[in-house]
Image (cartoon, rainbow, N blue to C red):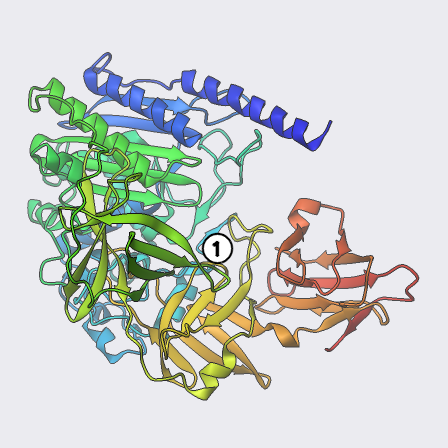
C-alpha cells in the first residue's frame, strides 16, 4: 500500500477510535444523575475531546463534602475500547503544588515551620550566588516570589523514576543567581515547590511522600493519590497516546513530586477541595486550622510588581488564583489550581463559601486550559440549577470594535520585546500594528498581523477580535499586554506578553566572538520523557543588529532567552515580567573544559560542536565509556554511503543520529535490536547512558578498509 494509503487508513482508524471514545462513559457517583451540571459537563467534555482529538477526561463534582457525581469520557485504553472509571489515575502536574502547600501549612500548624522565617533557618546548607537569597522565606516557596530561576527541567520528566533529581536540582540552584529580589515579583516557579520536599524532610524527619501520605492523604481518604515511585500496574492509570495508533506511551514520571509529580483522580481531588471549603476539616477530621486555610486563599501578589490585573494569576499559597475569572464573572469568589505535563492536564476549582467544587483530569492533548474550562462550566451549571445564577454566561461576541485613530505610541513603538523564550519585533505602519516573532534560525516571521487600533484603546484584528494588544509602563519598564479569552471564551484576561528592550553598549569581544558558534548538550538523561529525533541538541547565541549590546541564548530549540553579560564568562537573566512571562530564566556561564569553552545554561552543559571527534573508516572501532555525561562523535564528511554500527553495554544506553544540520535521522530506541543505520556524511552521533555504560562505534563505507575515529 502507498504512503498516502497508509495515512488514510490511520486517519480512518483514529476516527473509529474517537467515536468509540466519545460514546464510552465511566461510572457515576450517586446523587447527581440527570442534573444540569452533569448534562452540561457531559456535553462540554465530549466537545473538548472532539475539538482536541483528545484521549480521555475524568470529572467529578463535590458539594459539602459529598461527591455528587463522577464520570469518565473517551478511552483510557484504545486497543480494548475501555473508558476511564472514577478510580483511573491521571498525572495531575502542577496541581500537585496544592498538596505541597497543604503539607507546609500542616507543618505550620504543628509549630514546625513559620511561613515568614528564612528558608535557611530550616535548610542550613541553602545558599545561592546572590547574597539576597538569605531573604527567601518559606512563604515565598508557595507564592512564586522567591526569585529562583524557575524550573530545572533536566531529568525532571523521565520514563522511570529519577532518584537523583532533587539533589541535582538543589545543587544547580546553589550555584545560580536570583533573577529578582525576593518578594519583589510573583513569577511562576517550579523550583520553589521542589524545595518543599527538602523542607518537609528537614523538619519532619520523613520522606516527602511518606509525610504526605500519613498526614494528609490517608486521613482524607484520598486512597488513590500517590507518587510515581515505581511503575504502576497497567490498567490502573490513563496513559498518553501518540497522534495515531493504539500503542500507549510509557508511564510519565515527573520527578519533582511537590512541584508536579503526583497522580490522582477527580474524586480524590474533590476530597481535597472539600477540606479547603470546610475550613480545614473533612468528615470530622481536622487537617489544617481555619487560619491556615484562610492564609492559602489570600491574594499573595499585593505589594509586588503586577503591571496589569491578571485574574488567572492572583496567586494564593499553592493556588494559581484566588479570583477564578469565570466564577468571578458570575459573582462568586473561587480558588483554582491547574497543572500540565507532557501527557496530562488537570484543574481543581472550588467556591469556598458554597462548599462547591469540581475537579478534572485529562490525558493526550488535554491541558490545564481545557480542564479549567470544563470545571468552570460544571460549576456554572451547578449554580444555575441551584438558582444562584440566572443562566449560563454567553460566549463573548466575535465582533470587531470600530477602529479609531491611534495615539502617540513613540515610547513603545517601534521596538524589540522579549519574554521567557520569546522575542518579538513590533512595528506600526499605515495598516496598523504588526508583531513578528524571532524564529529558531534568528530570522523574523509574522506572529500577529492586521492589528487595527480600536475605540477601546487596544489593537486587534478582524479575524481574531478577542485577542487584543495594548501597552503599559510600570516600575521603569515598558510592556506589551495581551488581552485574550480563556478556552471557554466567556471572559477575557490581561497578561503581560513581553517587555521592551533598550539598546546598550556593544558586546565585549569575548561574547561577540561566540556569536555564530554551536554547542551541543552533553548531560541530557537518556530516559528523558518525550525524547525523540525531533530533539534539537544545539545551544546558540544571538545578537540583534538593530539592538546593540543584546545577547540571547537559544537552548535546544526552545526559543530565545535574554541574558545580560556581567563579565566575560557570566550573563544573567535580563527581563522583569510577573506571572508567566518571566518564568524559567537561567544563568549563562562559560566553562573551561580541557582548554575548550563550554557553556552552561541552567543545569544543562554544552560542548563546542567544532571540536567533536570525527569517526572515520580508516582505523579501529571507537570505544567509548561514559562518565556522568554523554559523548558526541561526528561522522566523516567524506564517507558517502556509509553504514553506522553501534554496540552498547550497561544500563540506560541510547544513541541518536543527526545529519549535518542537526535534523534527527534515527534513534536506537526505534531501531531496537538492530543497531545499524545509514550514516549521513558529516552527521553527528550522541551516546547517552548511565555512568559506566560502554559503546563500540563502527563506520563502514563501500570499499573501505576499516572503522574508527580521528580528531578533527
Q: Judging from the image, what secondary structure is the residue with disc 1 in?
A: loop
Query: Is residue 49 in sight in this rendering?
Result: yes
Q: Residue furthest top?
A: 34
Total numbered circles: 1
For residue 343, side relative to residue 133 (left or right): right
Q: Which quarter of the rendering shows the C terminus? A: bottom right
Identify which residue is drawn at 43% across, 74% down. Answer: 543
Task: Say whether residue 158 is left or right of residue 448.
Answer: right
Residue 312 visible, this orientation: no
What is the crowding at mark 1: few (fewer than 14 residues within 10 Å), some, or many (at least 20)?
some
Q: Nearer the viewer, residue 418 or 648?
A: 418
Question: 688 or 323: which is nearer to us?
Answer: 323
Name the spot of residue 683 as percent of width and height, x first: 70, 62
Q: Residue at x 93, y 62 (%)?
A: 703
Q: Check disc 1 and report the residue beneath it.
A: 162
Relative side of 359 to 639, left or right:
left
Residue 595 on image: x %, y %: 59, 86
Picture quadrant where residue 244 is located: top right
Q: Is residue 421 above or below residue 15?
A: below
Quadrant location of residue 204?
bottom left
**Would you place residue 285 above or below residue 508 in this image?**
above
Q: Residue at x 51, y 35 (%)?
A: 241
- Image quarter where the N terminus lies is top right
Q: Position of residue 439 (x, y in %)?
A: 46, 59
Provide residue 650's location: percent of width, then percent of height.
Answer: 67, 58
Q: Is residue 83 above or below residue 651?
A: above
Amino acid at each position: 500500500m502507498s504512503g498516502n494509503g497508509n495515512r488514510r487508513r490511520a486517519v480512518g482508524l483514529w476516527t473509529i477510535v474517537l467515536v468509540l471514545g466519545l460514546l464510552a462513559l465511566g461510572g457515576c457517583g450517586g446523587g447527581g444523575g440527570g442534573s444540569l451540571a452533569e448534562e452540561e459537563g457531559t456535553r462540554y467534555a465530549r466537545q473538548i475531546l472532539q475539538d482536541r482529538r483528545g484521549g480521555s477526561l475524568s470529572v467529578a463534582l463535590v458539594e459539602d463534602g459529598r461527591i455528587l457525581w463522577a464520570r469518565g469520557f473517551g478511552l483510557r485504553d484504545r486497543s480494548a475500547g475501555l473508558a476511564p472509571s472514577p478510580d483511573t489515575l491521571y498525572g495531575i502536574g502542577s496541581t500537585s503544588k496544592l498538596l505541597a502547600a497543604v503539607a507546609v501549612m500542616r507543618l505550620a500548624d504543628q509549630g514546625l515551620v513559620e511561613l515568614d522565617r528564612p528558608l535557611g533557618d530550616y535548610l542550613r546548607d541553602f545558599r545561592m550566588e546572590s547574597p539576597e537569597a538569605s531573604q527567601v522565606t518559606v512563604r515565598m516557596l508557595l507564592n512564586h516570589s522567591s526569585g529562583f530561576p524557575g524550573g530545572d527541567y533536566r531529568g525532571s520528566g523521565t520514563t522511570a523514576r529519577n532518584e537523583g533529581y532533587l539533589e541535582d536540582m538543589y545543587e544547580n540552584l546553589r550555584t545560580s543567581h536570583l533573577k529578582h529580589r525576593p518578594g519583589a515579583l510573583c513569577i511562576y516557579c517550579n523550583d520553589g515547590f521542589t524545595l518543599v520536599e527538602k523542607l518537609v524532610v528537614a523538619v519532619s524527619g520523613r520522606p516527602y511522600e511518606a509525610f504526605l501520605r500519613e498526614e494528609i492523604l490517608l486521613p482524607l481518604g484520598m486512597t488513590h493519590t500517590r507518587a510515581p515511585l515505581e511503575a504502576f500496574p497497567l490498567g490502573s492509570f490513563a496513559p498518553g497516546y501518540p497522534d495515531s495508533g493504539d500503542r500507549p506511551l510509557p508511564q510519565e514520571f515527573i520527578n519533582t513530586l511537590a512541584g508536579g509529580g503526583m497522580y490522582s483522580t477527580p474524586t480524590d481531588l474533590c476530597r481535597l477541595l472539600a477540606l479547603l471549603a470546610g475550613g480545614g476539616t473533612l468528615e470530622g477530621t481536622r487537617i489544617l486550622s481555619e487560619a491556615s486555610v484562610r492564609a492559602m486563599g489570600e491574594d499573595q501578589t499585593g505589594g509586588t510588581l503586577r503591571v496589569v490585573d491578571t485574574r488567572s494569576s492572583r496567586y494564593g499559597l499553592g493556588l494559581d488564583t484566588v479570583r477564578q475569572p469565570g466564577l468571578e464573572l458570575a459573582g462568586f469568589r473561587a480558588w483554582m489550581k491547574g497543572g500540565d505535563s507532557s501527557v496530562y492536564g488537570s484543574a481543581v476549582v472550588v467556591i469556598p463559601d458554597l462548599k462547591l467544587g469540581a475537579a478534572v483530569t485529562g490525558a493526550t492533548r488535554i491541558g490545564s486550559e481545557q480542564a479549567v474550562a470544563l470545571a468552570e462550566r460544571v460549576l456554572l451549571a451547578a449554580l444555575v440549577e441551584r438558582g444562584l445564577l440566572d443562566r449560563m454566561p454567553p460566549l463573548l461576541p466575535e465582533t470587531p470594535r470600530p477602529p479609531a485613530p491611534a495615539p502617540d505610541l513613540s515610547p513603545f513603538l517601534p521596538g524589540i520585546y522579549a519574554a521567557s523564550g520569546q522575542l518579538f519585533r513590533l512595528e506600526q505602519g499605515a495598516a496598523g500594528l504588526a508583531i513578528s516573532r524571532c524564529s529558531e534560525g534568528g530570522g523574523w516571521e509574522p506572529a500577529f498581523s492586521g492589528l487595527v487600533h480600536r475605540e477601546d484603546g487596544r489593537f486587534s484584528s478582524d479575524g481574531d477580535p478577542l485577542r487584543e494588544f495594548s501597552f503599559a509602563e510600570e516600575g521603569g519598564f515598558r510592556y506589551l499586554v495581551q488581552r485574550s479569552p480563556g478556552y471557554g471564551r466567556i471572559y477575557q484576561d490581561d497578561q503581560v506578553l513581553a517587555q521592551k528592550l533598550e539598546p546598550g553598549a556593544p558586546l565585549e569581544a569575548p561574547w561577540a566572538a561566540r556569536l555564530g558558534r554551536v554547542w551541543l548538550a552533553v548531560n541530557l538523561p537518556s530516559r528523558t520523557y518525550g525524547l525523540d529525533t525531533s530533539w534539537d541538541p544545539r545551544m546558540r547565541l544571538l545578537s540583534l543588529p538593530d539592538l546593540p549590546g543584546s545577547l540571547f541564548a537559544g537552548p535546544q530549540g526552545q526559543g530565545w532567552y535574554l541574558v545580560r553579560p556581567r563579565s566575560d564568562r557570566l550573563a544573567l537573566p535580563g527581563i522583569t515580567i510577573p506571572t508567566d512571562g518571566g518564568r524559567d530564566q537561567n544563568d549563562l556561564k562559560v566553562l573551561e573544559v580541557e582548554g575548550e569553552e563550554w557553556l552552561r545554561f541552567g543545569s544543562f552543559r554544552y560542548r563546542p560542536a567544532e571540536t567533536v571527534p570525527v569517526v572515520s573508516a580508516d582505523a579501529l572501532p571507537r570505544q567509548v565509556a561514559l562518565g556522568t555525561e554523554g559523548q558526541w562523535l561526528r561522522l566523516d564528511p567524506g564517507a558517502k554511503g556509509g553504514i553506522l554500527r553501534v554496540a552498547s553495554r550497561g544500563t540506560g544506553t541510547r544513541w541518536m543520529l543527526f545529519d549535518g544540520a542537526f535534523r534527527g535521522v534515527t534513534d536506537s530506541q526505534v531501531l531496537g535490536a538492530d543497531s545499524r543505520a545509514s550514516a549521513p556524511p558529516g552527521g553527528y552521533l550522541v551516546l547517552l547512558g548511565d555512568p559506566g555504560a560502554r559503546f563500540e562505534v563502527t563506520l563502514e563505507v563501500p570499499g573501505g578498509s576499516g572503522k574508527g575515529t580521528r580528531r578533527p
